[in-house]
């Protein structure tokens, strides 16, 4: 899933977040990779095809990372 997220309540720079159903995500700004997080490749109870819950969790984590970066940037 690809989502565009704007930090600082819609007034900051725009980021593109790409997340998959296994919990991996990539944050890009102007086509440049800012952060990439990969989930564990194998663990007990890992859904074979992933899940929407893991995808949403990855999106939330990416948004939190963007917001945290902008809070410390002041």
Image (cartoon, grey):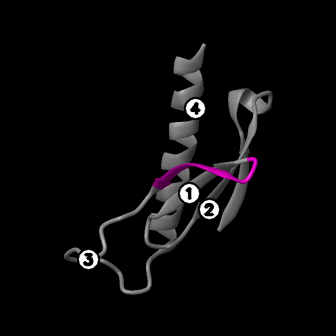
- As drawn, the residue found furthest toward the front would be 32
Tags 1 and 2 in contact by the CB under 8 Å rule? yes
Towards the viewer: 31 or 19: 31
Query: Image point 75% across, 29% down: which residue?
Result: 12
Query: Image point 53% across, 48% down: which residue?
Result: 62
Disc 3 is placed on an element classified as loop
CA gap between label 2 and label 4 equals 16 Å
- Reply above or below: 36 against 52: above
Q: Quadrant of residue 23?
A: bottom left
What mark, if any, has residue 16 been given in the picture?
Answer: none
CA gap between label 4 and label 1 equals 15 Å
Query: Image point 30% across, 67% down: which residue?
Result: 40
Bounds of the magenta segment: 30-36
CA neighbours of label 4 inside 10 A, class few (<14), some (14 to 19), many (20+): some
- Reply above or below: 46 against 70: below
Q: What is the x, y in percent for residue 34?
A: 58, 46
Taking the magenta stretch, the answer to whether it contains residue 31 is: yes
Disc 4 is placed on an element classified as helix
Precedes in sequence: disc 1 or disc 3: 1
Precedes in sequence: disc 3 or disc 4: 3
Q: Nearer the viewer, mark 1 or mark 3?
A: 1
Query: Image point 22% across, 74% down: which residue?
Result: 43
Residue 57 relative to residue 31: left or right: left
| Magenta stretch, main secondary structure class | strand
What mark, if any, has residue 67 been given in the picture?
Answer: 4
Quadrant including the C terminus: top right
Q: Which residue is mark 2?
A: 18
CA neighbours of label 2 inside 10 A, class few (<14), some (14 to 19), many (20+): some
Q: What is the x, y in percent for residue 10?
A: 78, 32
Q: Nearer the viewer, mark 4 or mark 1?
A: 1
- As drawn, the residue found furthest toward the top would be 74
């Amino acid at each position: 899933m690809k989502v565009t997220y704007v930090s600082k309540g819609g007034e900051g720079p725009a980021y593109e977040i790409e997340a998959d159903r296994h919990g991996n995500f990539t944050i890009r700004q102007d086509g440049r990779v800012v952060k990439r997080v990969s989930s564990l490749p194998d663990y007990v109870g890992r859904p074979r095809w992933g899940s929407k819950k893991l995808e949403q969790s990855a999106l939330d984590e990416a948004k939190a990372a963007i917001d945290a970066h902008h809070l410390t940037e002041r």
